[in-house]
Image (tube, rainbow, N blue to C red):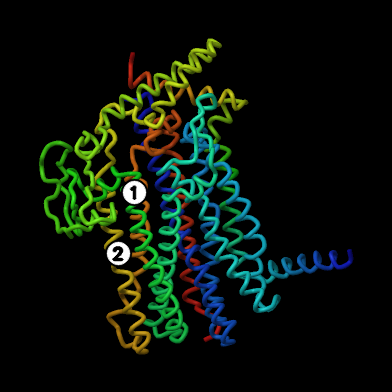
């Protein structure tokens, strides 16, 4: 138990010292966070909603919609 | 022609291409530099020479910059799947869901553990454990590329699945068929080894710059030797896997092979076009010569496509209009079967709606007879099955020409390095300096061949791109296209700027 606690403490210290000692890394982390914010908060939320998830609640509804899309293309291309 | 605005589909395609091409600037460097760092560090651990250590740390810093800027840029492709390609996304969800989830989980654990040791662990863990971590990052980065290439390989050659009309999905029925799909295997080897090659050129470029500037001479020479050996070996793998890829394309996507060779009329033995200018006015079936000028190498296309000197290689016209002598079915015949399959699908859906299970079962049985031709049912005319010719043709020839040049370049660098004459061969260093740029063009050309050459299909023979897309307003896709263009350009500028600064600083000690 004590050994486990020491290991966790060592891992924590390893990461803490690693992050503290970063020079260029700090700038890179800033870029990563800004990028992730732009991607997930701005782009994903406002510009890239999952089309089917926003229109339908269940898998059955999604299946029906996609199948209708596949068939609709057929009827337009191949009028009976 | 279609109920979807074609300009929207084209904008969505352009957006996907833009994202993939930018993403593919960062990825090959990650794939290759990770291994180069592992080689440099292995030499340090073996020799104990601290200059190898500072050299390793320098290249590791550039690797870290590239990784940080490039990380998660591929996720944008997944955003696009959900928004612009929702039909496709749903239809293939069962096939791609597992591989992409594995990739995400794998990448997370890898990055959280071994990356940390690689960058934070100098002087904190033993030399050997640090080296082990560097190797694990290299192996793991490359393994995480497996899954996305498995997905791409499946789109080029859909196997190990069955279409379920009840769920409107391709459902995986054999995981191993999907993972060991021969197209996916050759694609992974070709793509990752081309990434190694590109990273070797990157090391060559920066090292040549140091030599030209008379800075960090010893470090630059050592880097050139390792990069040239790795680059030369990688070039061999690229060539061998390129041969396998060409063979697979000939068997699974013969139209793509005909397009990248500008081959309209099939022949056996077939010559490969070493260089040539296409006639832009050429149309299938017009009997005009497709080339304004060409230089050919006899037999080579037959060897590539069939592994025989005299094997017949079908041309675009054979594949579109059929060739009874060679047993090639025409697109018109496939279209008839495809339309029949889609009519049966419609009947199945209608019967289900009316709760007529007997009729539904009958329609399903009929559908299964022609389901492999389903995609052809969406084409309006046989010529719709032809991809653009000029783009993949020129891209293929640029890729092959550069791919032939690179091993020669690495061999020349190794030769002069062995004579310790790199600093004296002033003519060679500027070539090394621009080699990364050439590598960039070769890399991008490869993807252009793979993706433009498989048009009009999102899933080869089963789903054309216009059916795969979402019916959105063109304006929406245009807006996000330019947003991505701006975002990625900013990221690229950031990468170049930070890298140039680090290169200017150079290794810590000399």
Count all numbered tags in the image, as a single digit.
Answer: 2
Viewer-side residue, B168 vs B501: B168
Task: Tell me the subunit letter for badge 2.
Answer: B
Identify the mark nearer the N-term, 2 or 1: 1
Q: Dot 2: what SS?
A: helix
The quarter of the rendered structure image containing the N terminus of chain A is bottom right
The residue beneath circle 1 is B249
| Image position of B351 with respect to B180: above or below | above
Q: Quadrant of residue A23?
A: bottom right
**Residue B177 or B464: which is nearer the viewer?**
B177
Is B99 left, or right, of B380 in this rendering?
Answer: right
Residue B303 falls in which quadrant of the image?
A: bottom left
**Which residue: 80% across, 67% down?**
A7
Q: Residue at x 72, y 70 (%)?
A: A17
Which disc is residue B402 wearing? 2
CB contact under 8 Å: marks 2 and 1: no
Indicate whether A43 appears above or below B350: below
Q: Are marks 2 and 1 on the same chain?
A: yes
Mark 1 crowdedness (10 Å alpha carbons): few <14, some 14-19, many ≥20 = many
The secondary structure type at the circle numbered 1 is helix
Q: What chain letter is assigned to the residue under label 1? A: B
Q: Is residue B350 left or right of residue B282?
A: right
Q: Nearer the viewer, residue B75 or B251?
A: B251
- Residue B260's spot in the image, x, y percent? 26, 49
Q: Position of residue B210 (x, y in %)?
A: 41, 80
What percent of the width, then of the height, locates residue B285? 15, 36
Mark 2 or mark 1, whichever is nearer to me:
1
Can you give x and y, in whole percent of width and height, for residue B271 in the image? 18, 55
């Amino acid at each position: 138990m004590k050994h486990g606690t020491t290991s966790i403490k060592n891992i924590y210290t390893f990461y803490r010292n690693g992050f503290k000692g970063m020079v260029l890394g700090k700038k890179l982390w800033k870029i990563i966070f800004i990028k992730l914010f732009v991607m997930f908060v701005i782009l994903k939320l406002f510009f890239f909603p999952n089309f089917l998830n926003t229109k339908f609640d269940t898998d059955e509804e999604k299946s029906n919609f996609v199948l209708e899309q596949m068939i609709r293309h057929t009827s337009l291309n191949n009028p009976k | 022609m279609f109920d979807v605005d074609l300009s929207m589909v084209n904008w969505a395609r352009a957006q996907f291409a833009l994202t993939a091409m930018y993403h593919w600037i960062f990825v090959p460097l990650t794939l290759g530099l990770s291994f180069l760092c592992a080689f440099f560090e292995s030499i340090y651990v073996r020799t104990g020479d601290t200059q190898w250590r500072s050299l390793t740390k320098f290249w590791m810093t550039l690797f870290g910059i590239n990784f940080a800027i490039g990380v998660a840029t591929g996720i944008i492709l997944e955003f696009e799947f959900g928004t612009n390609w929702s039909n496709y996304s749903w239809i293939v969800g069962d096939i791609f869901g597992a591989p992409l989830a594995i990739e995400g989980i794998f990448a997370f654990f890898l990055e959280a553990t071994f990356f940390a040791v690689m960058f934070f662990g100098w002087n904190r863990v033993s030399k050997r454990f640090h080296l082990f971590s560097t190797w694990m990052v290299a192996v793991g980065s490359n393994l995480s590329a497996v899954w996305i290439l498995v997905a791409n390989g499946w789109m080029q050659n859909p196997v190990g699945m069955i279409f379920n009309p009840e769920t409107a999905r391709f459902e995986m029925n054999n995981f191993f068929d999907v993972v060991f799909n021969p197209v996916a295997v050759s694609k992974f080897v070709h793509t990752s080894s081309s990434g190694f090659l590109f990273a070797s050129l990157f090391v060559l470029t920066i090292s040549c710059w140091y030599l030209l500037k008379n800075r960090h001479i010893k470090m630059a020479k050592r880097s050139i030797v390792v990069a040239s050996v790795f680059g030369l070996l990688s070039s061999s793998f690229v060539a061998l896997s390129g041969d396998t890829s060409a063979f697979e394309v000939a068997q699974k996507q013969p139209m793509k092979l005909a397009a990248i060779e500008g081959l309209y009329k099939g022949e056996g033995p077939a010559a490969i076009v070493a260089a040539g200018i296409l006639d832009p006015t050429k149309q299938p079936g017009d009997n005009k010569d497709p080339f304004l000028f060409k230089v050919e190498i006899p037999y080579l296309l037959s060897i590539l496509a069939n592994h025989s000197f005299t094997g017949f290689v079908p041309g675009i016209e054979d594949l579109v209009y059929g060739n009874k002598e060679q047993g090639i079915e025409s697109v018109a015949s496939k279209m008839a079967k495809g339309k029949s399959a889609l009519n049966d699908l419609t009947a199945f859906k209608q019967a289900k709606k009316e709760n007529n299970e007997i009729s539904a079962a009958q329609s399903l049985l009929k559908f299964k007879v022609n389901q492999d031709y389903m995609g052809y049912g969406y084409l309006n005319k046989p010529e719709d099955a032809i991809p653009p010719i000029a783009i993949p043709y020129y891209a293929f020839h640029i890729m092959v020409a550069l791919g032939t040049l690179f091993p020669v370049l690495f061999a020349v660098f190794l030769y002069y390095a062995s004579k310790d004459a790199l600093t004296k061969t002033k003519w060679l260093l500027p070539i090394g300096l621009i080699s990364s740029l050439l590598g960039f063009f070769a890399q991008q050309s490869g993807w252009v061949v793979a993706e433009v050459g498989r048009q009009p299909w999102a899933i080869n023979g089963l789903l054309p791109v216009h059916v795969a897309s979402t019916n959105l307003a063109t304006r929406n896709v245009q807006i996000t296209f330019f947003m991505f263009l701006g975002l990625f350009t900013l990221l690229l500028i950031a990468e170049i700027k930070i890298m140039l600064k680090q290169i200017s600083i150079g290794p810590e000690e000399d």
